[in-house]
Image (cartoon, grey):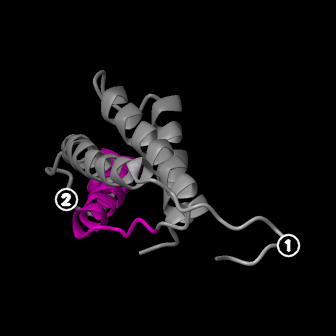
Amino acid sequence: MLDPIADKLLVGAALMMLVGTARLGPFGLYPAIVIMLREILVSGLREYLAGVRVGLPVTRLAKWKTGVQMVALGTLLAGDPAARLLGIGWLPASAIGAALLWIAAALTLLTGWDYLTAGLRHAARPQAKAPRPGTSPG
């Protein structure tokens, strides 16, 4: 997949463009908000844990979530006009994209919860004190 920061920027920019141009349906804003909030939460959590030298590995489900997001956003960006152009105008591309966005939002909640609980477990552990500069450990 893409660099983790790059795919968050890509997803965020695409969601903002879809919302700004009213290409999402009346309830399409809700999965967009869920996805954006999760991306911010997980990015912040990763930064915090990196500061205490704890890695938070990407899960397989999170990779699927990103894949579903990318397909949903691509379908929504292309929309029904692109389906007609490709000769598959009978296919409701916008509705399929919206359904995939809701699926991506559900996966977003699941993976966000997984990352949050894993991060809180690491944050709750007592940290070993680092030696003061200029002193030797032990």
User: Which region is colored magenta?
Assistant: 55-83
In front here: 87 or 44? 44
Task: Establish if 19 lies above or below 118.
Answer: above
The image shows residue 54 at horizontal and vertical percentages of 48, 66
Q: Residue at x 55, y 67 (%)?
A: 53
In front here: 71 or 122? 122
In magenta segment, residue 67:
yes
Picture quarter containing residue 37? top left
Counting residues from the start of the chain, the first of labels 2 and 1 encountered is: 2
Instruction: Let me know if residue 31 appears in the view.
Output: yes
Q: Which mark is residue 134?
A: 1
Badge 2 local density, few (<14 within 10 Å), some, or many (20+)? Answer: few
Q: Residue at x 26, y 52 (%)?
A: 114
Task: Establish if 128 lies above or below 100.
Answer: below
Q: How many marks?
A: 2
Q: SS at mark 2?
A: loop
Q: Please give left or right for residue 11 compared with residue 48 in the image.
A: left
**Which secondary structure dominates the residues rendered in magenta?**
helix
Q: Please give left or right for residue 111 compared with residue 40 in the image.
A: left
Badge 1 local density, few (<14 within 10 Å), some, or many (20+)? Answer: few
Q: SS at mark 1?
A: loop
> Mark 2 sits on what residue?
88
In magenta segment, residue 76:
yes
Q: Please give left or right for residue 116 compared with residue 136 in the image.
A: left
Q: Residue at x 22, y 50 (%)?
A: 107
| Quadrant of the rendering where the N terminus is positioned | bottom left
Instruction: Let me know if residue 93 appears in the view.
Output: no
Direction left: furthest residue: 90
CB atoms of marks 2 and 1 within 8 Å: no
The amino acid at mark 2 is: Ile
| Quadrant of the rendering where the C terminus is positioned | bottom right
